[in-house]
Image (cartoon, rainbow, N blue to C red):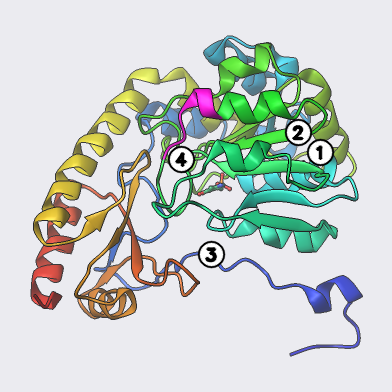
Amino acid sequence: MNSPLWSNVVSELTPYVPGEQPKGEGLIKLNTNENPYGPSPKVISAIAAVLNDSLRLYPDPTALQLRETIANYYRLIPEQVFVGNGSDEVLAFVFQGLLAHGKPIIFPDISYSFYPVYCQLYGIEYQTIALDDALRIQAEDYISPLLPKIGGIIFPNPNAPTSRLLPLDEIEKIVAAHPAIVVVIDEAYIDFGGETAIPLIARYPNVLITQSLSKSRALAGLRVGLALGHPALIEALVRIKDSFNSYPLDRLALAGAKAAFEDHDYFSSICARIIEARSALTEALQQRGFEVLPSGANFLFVQHPQNAGLTLYQGLRAHHVIVRHFNKPRISEYLRITVGTPAENSALLAALDLLLTA
Ligand SMILES: *Cc1c(COP(=O)(O)O)cnc(C)c1O
């Protein structure tokens, strides 16, 4: 459908397609990298404690208490912290406020599929840089003298959907080579064993790090994301926010997110369980002939030499296990599988045992 009532930009858009959120019961959902465990019980109590008449009042537009809590947690100051309605919203502000300079921006050819959508929404040109044959980011490709004049750089670390982690010294090379543009590290999955780039903030005013409470803190339903960087970068995001929606985080989200950062023990225990389940699942898939990319995330990116990606995706679906398949160049033989609970992972393996042909 297309309507003459639409603006030009809407007619041209190709929106992002989120992973399926099935209505039916009894499905094993390993398709959107949600946490298989619930949030900290302290998060639930903190939200319950603000479920009262205070909801008649607007929330704090500056989210100061939450920003102070996050700043303490990472040994930053609140002026280095921005929070928004999921890191997708934070990223939208980053594209509009820090990456749009009338020059192309660059990101990997295989990466978070929201990036080209933001480019289209905000009229930002982009060029993609091919991952190497092992689907790794090569830092040299991002500092090459052959690059055109660029307006900014963004990539996830670990990368999605490949799950591969780029070491911090490689990231630093990219950030250091581009003092005049913003380099954004999307750390949606960094808590699953990766090394965060936050220490670079003290030395590089051009690095911005985004994180999400949706994966490692089990709060995809609350919609909270953050950006960390030099106060001048954070100020740009605040200016966009205050020109769009002064209150992106409601009272429940502010209370729940603060409690999530205050319960470090719960957070580290669920991350440790997922990391342990990730190694067990990696080994079990390798025993069944899968090639599994080394993962620094809460998902695996796998392919099987004798079984097509799409066939396995459809077969698993018929056995009530949902994973993600991308019908895209270079990765159409792969499946992206979220690491679930040990029981969910066993159900996945049992379904694969019925499907795999040697
Ligand atoms: C999940 C994800 C996000 C978005 O997270 P939300 O906070 O839920 O909006 C951003 N970047 C990448 C790479 C992701 O996988």
96 relative to 141 in the view: left or right: right
* 252 falls in the magenta region: no
Query: Label 3 near label 2: C-beta < 8 Å?
Result: no
Eye-nearest disc, 2 or 1: 2
Residue that label 1 marks:
98
- From the image, which quarter does the C terminus lie in? bottom left
What is the magenta range? 165-170
Element marked by disc 4? loop
Residue 65, by quadrant, is top right
Element marked by disc 1? helix
Q: Which three-letter amino acid code belongs to the residue tagged 1?
A: Leu
Q: Which three-letter amino acid code belongs to the residue tagged 3?
A: Pro
Rendered view: 329 above or below 187: below
Q: Nearer the viewer, residue 217 or 48?
A: 217
Q: Nearer the viewer, residue 34 or 188?
A: 188
- From the image, which quarter does the N terminus lie in? bottom right
Residue that label 2 marks:
182
Element marked by disc 2? strand
Query: Label 2 near label 4: C-beta < 8 Å?
Result: no
Location of residue 7 in the rendering, given as x and y in whole percent from the top left corner: 90, 75
Q: Which three-letter amino acid code belongs to the residue tagged 2?
A: Val
Q: Which mark is residue 158?
A: 4
Q: Of the two numbered discs 2 and 1 on the same chain, state the one appearing first in sequence.
A: 1
Disc 2 from disc 3: Cα separation:
27 Å
Query: Label 1 near label 2: C-beta < 8 Å?
Result: yes
Disc 4 from disc 1: Cα separation:
22 Å
